[in-house]
Structure formats: structure tokens, C-alpha cells
Amino acid sequence: MAMISSQTMASRLKRLPFRVACGATIWLAAACLSPLAAQQALPAQGGQPGSASGQLPAGHPVVSPSRMGQNPVTMPPAAAPGPVQPSSPQPSFVPNDQGGIEARPPVSQTATGVVTPAAGPATAPTAETALPELPSLQGPSAGGLPHDLSPWGMFMQADLVVKAVMVGLAFASLITWTVWLAKSIELAAAKRRARRSLTGLVEARSLEDAESNLMQGRLDKGVVAALVRAAKQEEDVSADLPADGIKERASAALSRIEARAGRLMTRGTGLLATIGATAPFVGLFGTVWGIMNSFIGIAKSNTTNLAVVAPGIAEALLATAIGLVAAIPAVIIYNVFARGITGYRAMLADAGTEVLRHLSRDLDRRAAANGRRKPSLFAAAE
């Protein structure tokens, strides 16, 4: 550019006056020599900034030869380049999920290369930048479902129908254990008396010996004693009648006594059978009702959160659990009593058979005695 400007100016000097041509020549020489002088002076200054790129030193005027014949235009001296200062970070603006614009703090880079967020003024969240409110997790309290998940807490928070079912099943369980206690004592005592009486019957040689043992208190005053009295009474009443009829009538009386004793011993076992058969279904009814209420609570709360669903289902299943607690022991106790009563009836049957054996022996002895007496009477008549 300097060479082109010099040729252009030389062609124009030929058309100018002498004085003007001299001044322009001096000015052109100064403009051409000033950059060379500056480049020679920069290495002597110790390599100041701007020497590598050919920039002028600070404070040196820059002359622009734009037009000849006009006053030269002098550019203001450029400021000396100094150390590069990092520009202050500016905040960035990004769109958020609600369609608005969210301001984020700027990020600055330290000398170690770690990018850290620049400290900026704390701004309060606006309506556009605020996060959406999370749903509350207190669903059970809002829906009126129980907080206490213990059996008593679920019972207190249960529906009236479910409470009635639970109370009924608890009462049935109480009846089951009451029958078990009373019937166990009664059956054990009856078996003990029957065993002792059967031993006394086996040791006796006749109904008279058995009756004497009964009067002396060696035989318990129970079913076996009633069998002995019934057989002795039939023998005394039918003394002048054939022996076969006496045995038949005595057997019928003894069978009725045994049946009555067995029927009395089975009292309460029918209740156990009823509880064992119906308690699970009653508990299932409470479960169905509780699940219905749980679904109604879910519909009212407009949520399917497990914290809302679980208490109602647990409350419903509690009714089934109580039903099983009432039914399972009732069935087991009923089977135990059935076996025990069957054994007791077998002992009564053995005692009745022993009584009939003594009765048959007594009748045969009396018939033998009458047979020996009749030939002697005929001999005396002759």
C-alpha cells in the first residue's frame, strides 16, 4: 500500500506548484520512513507488546495520506495494549418446561480449567420459573384411612359392618375355647368314672355283687351305676317270666341309657362344627365389604397411591384373619372331641355288655335252681 501511494503521489506532484510539491515530498518521506524507524526502535525497548504484529508504539501519531493538497489527517494515538483481563461472565437465559425463560447463573473458568458457576445476584423465583408443586404424600389422612396399622388401630378405623363382623368372629372364638375347656373337663371326668366302674363290674360275680359294690360306693354313681340298677330292676319285676324276655327288655333299657349318656356328652360339639364351617365365610364377607370401602376411598381421593390403598385392604384382610382364627381351632377341637366321645361310648357299650352278662348268668342260675327243685316235688307227691 505504501508503494502504490508513493507512485500515485509522484504523478500528482508534477501538476502542483513548487512550494506545495516540496511540502508534499517532505511529508511523503516522513510517512514512508516513520514505520521503519518504529520497527528498528522496538527491539531496543525489550520486545514491547505489538512489535510482532507490526503495530506502532504507543503515543506515535498515525498519518493518513488520503488526499493531496489538504491538511494531513492525524489519527489519535492508540492506547498501549495491557494484560488481557477476563471479561465478566454474563448470565444465560434458557427456556423452562412451562414455556417461560429461566435465568441461570453464568459459568466462569478458573486458571486450573475447572468450570465453576460465577457468583451472581440471587434472584427470587417468579411465577414462571417456580417449580410445580409436588403432590402430597398424606393420602391416608386425607381419605380418613387409618394411620395405625396395628390390629387394634385397624379395628377402630374400620366400617361399622366390618366391626360387627370382627366382634362376632371374636365372640365365636371365645365360645370355641370355652366349649373346649368345659367339654375337656367333662369328658375326662366321665371317662375316668366309666373306667373305674367297668373295672368293678369285671370283678363282680353277679348283679347282686355289682349292686352291693354300688351301695358301698366302690362304683361311681354315673352311667354304669344306672345300667346296673336298670338291669336289676328288670330282673326283679320279671322274676316269674321267661328269661329270654327279661334279657331282651334289659338290653333295650341299657341301650337307651347308653344313647342318652352319649347324647349328653356331645352337647356343644355341634356349635364347634357350626363355627368351623361358617366362620371363614363370615370373615370373607367382612373382607369383601372392606375392599368395597377401600375402592370408594380411592375414588374419593383421586389417587392410586399405595399409602391410600394399603390400609383399606389390610383392614379388609383382618376380618378374614379373625375368621380363620375362629374356624381353625373350632374344627380341630371338634375332631378331638368326636374321637374322645366315640371312645367314651365304646366304654359305655362295654359296661352294658358286662351288665347283660351278669344278668344272663343270674337268670341261668335261677333256672337251674328251679329245675332241680321240680323233680324233688314230683317224688314227694308219689
Image (tube, helix red, strand yellow):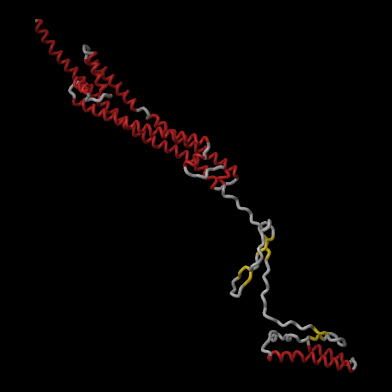
Residue 326: x and y, percent? 42, 36
The image quarter containing residue 204 is: top left
Residue in the foreground of this view, choosing between 85 and 365: 85
Residue in the foreground of this view, choosing between 382 and 158: 158
Residue 74 left/right relative to 207: right
How many numbered marks have been drawn onto this rendered protein structure?
Answer: 0
Residue 373: x and y, percent? 13, 11
Residue 342 left/right relative to 142: left
The image quarter containing residue 252 is: top left
Residue in the foreground of this view, choosing between 251 and 126: 126
**Looking at the rendering, in which quadrant would you find the N terminus?**
bottom right
Residue 153: x and y, percent? 49, 42
The image quarter containing residue 350 is: top left
Identify the residue at image location x=57%, y=49%: 137
Residue 56 left/right relative to 134: right
**Figure check: 30 above or below 75:** below
Residue 81: x and y, percent? 70, 82
Identify the residue at image location x=59%, y=74%: 112
Identify the residue at image location x=60%, y=51%: 135
**Figure check: 19 above or below 232:** below
**Figure check: 83 above or below 128:** below
**Looking at the rendering, in which quadrant would you find the C terminus?**
top left
